[in-house]
Image: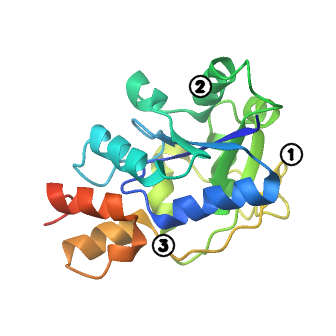
Amino acid sequence: MKIAMLGGSFNPIHVGHLILADSVCRSLGYDKILFVPTATPPHKELSSSVSASDRLEMTRLAVMDDERFETESCEIERGGVSYSWDTVCYLEKKYASVLEGKVGLIFGEDLLPDYDKWEKAAELAKKADLILACRPHDTGLKAEFQNIPTEKYGKSPMAGVNLENFPYPHKIVQNPKMEISSSEIRQKIAENGAWRYLVTGRVFEYIKERNLYAK
C-alpha cells in the first residue's frame, strides 16, 4: 500500500485539503492519505483558542466518507512540538507490514524556502518521498502554515526556491490551485461572512454547534 501523510493545524480543515489529497491519490497513485493534525507546530503559533481535540474531530468528520482518507492522531497524542521527521518514523513502524516504498510527505510550495530549517531536513528527504503541491501565492497560506519570526530563526537559507529548483529529490502533484485558507475561513466566521461551502457539511455543523471561531 502506498501511503502519504498530510500534516497541518487543520484549524479548520477545508475542502482544499481534501482536493489536494484526492489529487495525490489520482495523479501519483497513492492508496491512503493520512491527515495528521499537529499538536504544537515548530514554526508558528496556533491562531485560535480552538482545542486540539476540536481540530482532531473536525479532521475525522471531514475525511470519514472517503475510504482512501484516514485521520492519524499520533502528533496530538504525542504532544509537544510536532516534527515531520518523528511522524514519518512513527508511520514507517506502524504500517511496516503493508507499506509499499517510502511514506509520502505532502506539503505546499509556499514552505520550500524554509525547508532547510526543518528538523533533520536532509535525512527526511531521503527517508520520505517529498510530495510538493502547487499553491496560490496570494491566499495567506504561507502565514497560516509557517508564521516564522525572522529574529528567532534567521533569514531563510533557500530564499527564491520554488518547485522547479527545489534541491532535494521530490515529486510534484498537479493539484488545482484552490484559493482557500483556514485563516480566511476563521475570519469569515468571525465577521459573519460566507464560508458554508468552504468546508464539508459535517465540519460546518460541528463549527456551528460549538460556536467555534466566532467573536
Question: Is any atom of residue 160 visible in this view?
Answer: yes
Residue under label 2: 86
Question: Residue 180 bears which disc, if any?
Answer: 3
Instruction: Give me the residue at 74% from left, 24% from top.
Output: 98
Q: Quadrant of residue 126?
A: top right
Residue 209: x percent and y percent?
Answer: 16, 58
Q: Nearer the viewer, residue 34 or 41?
A: 34
What is the CA distance from the residue labelled 1 to the residue labelled 2? 20 Å
Q: Quadrant of residue 77?
A: top left
- Mark 1 residue element: loop
Quarter of the image where the N terminus is located = top right
Q: Is residue 163 left or right of residue 157?
A: right
In this view, 2 is above or below 142: above
Residue 99: x percent and y percent?
Answer: 75, 27
Q: Is residue 146 left or right of residue 52?
A: right
Q: Nearer the viewer, residue 39 or 164?
A: 39
Question: Residue 169 bears which disc, if any?
Answer: 1
Please state which amino acid type lies under the numbered disc 1: Pro
Quarter of the image where the C terminus is located = bottom left
Precedes in sequence: disc 1 or disc 3: 1
The residue mark sitting in front, 3 or 2, is 3
Residue 207: x percent and y percent?
Answer: 24, 59
What is the CA distance from the residue labelled 3 to the residue labelled 2? 28 Å
In this view, 214 is above or below 72: below
Asked if disc 1 and disc 3 are in contact, CB closer than 8 Å, the reply is no
The residue mark sitting in front, 1 or 3, is 3
